[in-house]
Amino acid sequence: MQGQDSSLTSCGWRHFDFAGLLSRLCPPLRPSPGDVENLRRAISAGGKRILLLGVTPELSILGADLTAVDNDQRMIDHIWPGDRAGRRALLADWTDLPFPSESFDAVIGDASPNAAAEQVDEVIAEARRVLAPGGTAAFRLFCSPEQGETLEFIRDDVAAGWLGNFHALKWRIAMVLAGKEPRGIVPVGEILAAFNRLFPDRGALAAFTNWPPEDIATIDAYVGAEHSLGFPRLSAMRELIGRHFSAVSVIEAENYPLAERCPTVVCRR
């Protein structure tokens, strides 16, 4: 499946230095140590055989035996920490996983449903299929707020000294755009275009906020990119996941900008 910045499982990075881009990302785009711990605890009861949707390095350490799947060999080549005993990455489609039913004790991912914007229902269905009875699916999500904001409010908030980081700003912009669509899906090119309209002088933005220009430049990974990302509200995600799992709980994220919009959803089969 196509992906997003946190797991970097995307066709949209074809002109970028993968390792250099990854080094510039931080929460909310990448999972924090607290997010990783939330996932660890969610799967701790029986999380021996783990399926990771994406190649998120921070999550590659979880479980006794972990298989990561991504649909882009470049991501596996450049982002995956490398195969070793009990850790491996495979080229595969999240909507058609090459595993028998009930193969894993847990399925995890960092914003994997957001990355699968057009096929999120199929991805959740596949996650349930490969889970053993009693297994757990757990995903950190990017969720638009139930009460939306406007692009103008975001611009004014930054001018007033908002204490977030550039990556949180990018997601705030994305969520405004996604909120205008019934399924909460936005092409990443529209995120770039909206940012450029709001903040046409990047040098002034960097000087005022003290954000490194190199961080701001990461948004140029969206130049020419054709994929979309999903930013549904948490209520909508719970409803969708509830079609496949009867027990769904939420763990709130903490201690980084926009953490309130990055919950971990835990589903028990």
Image (spheres, grey):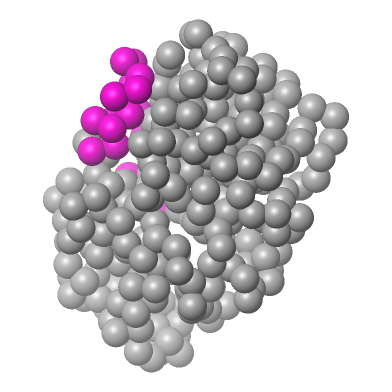
Is there any visible trace of residue 43 in the rendered image?
A: no
**49 on left or right of 207:** right
70 or 172, which is in the foreground? 70
Where does the C terminus fall, quadrant-wise? top left
Residue at 54% of width from left, 36% of height from top?
96
The answer to whether 227 is drawn above or below residue 63 in the figure is: below
* Residue 166 highlighted magenta (yes or no): no
Q: Report whether residue 60 is seen.
A: yes
Where are the magenta residues, as a range?
A: 236-261
In this picture, residue 150 sits left or right of residue 10: left
The residue shown at (70%, 59%) is: 74
- When the figure is inspected, residue 32 is found, relative to residue 139, above or below; the finding is below
Q: Residue sitting at 18 percent across and 52 percent down?
A: 182
Q: Of all residues shown, which one is farthest toward the top?
A: 133
Asked which quadrant contains residue 45, the reply is top right
Locate residue 117, reporting x and y percent.
38, 50
Residue 168: give x, y in percent of width and height. Answer: 39, 61
Residue 131, given in percent of the width and then of the height, sits at 53, 18
What's the residue at 48%, 78% (across, down)? 223
Q: Residue furthest right?
A: 85
In the image, taking residue 221 as reference, residue 22 lies left or right, namely: right
Q: Position of residue 209 (x, y in %)?
A: 41, 77
Q: Looking at the rendering, which quadrant does residue 240 occupy?
A: top left
The image quadrant of residue 180 is bottom left
Magenta stretch: residue 238 in it? yes
Q: Nearer the viewer, residue 197 or 243?
A: 243
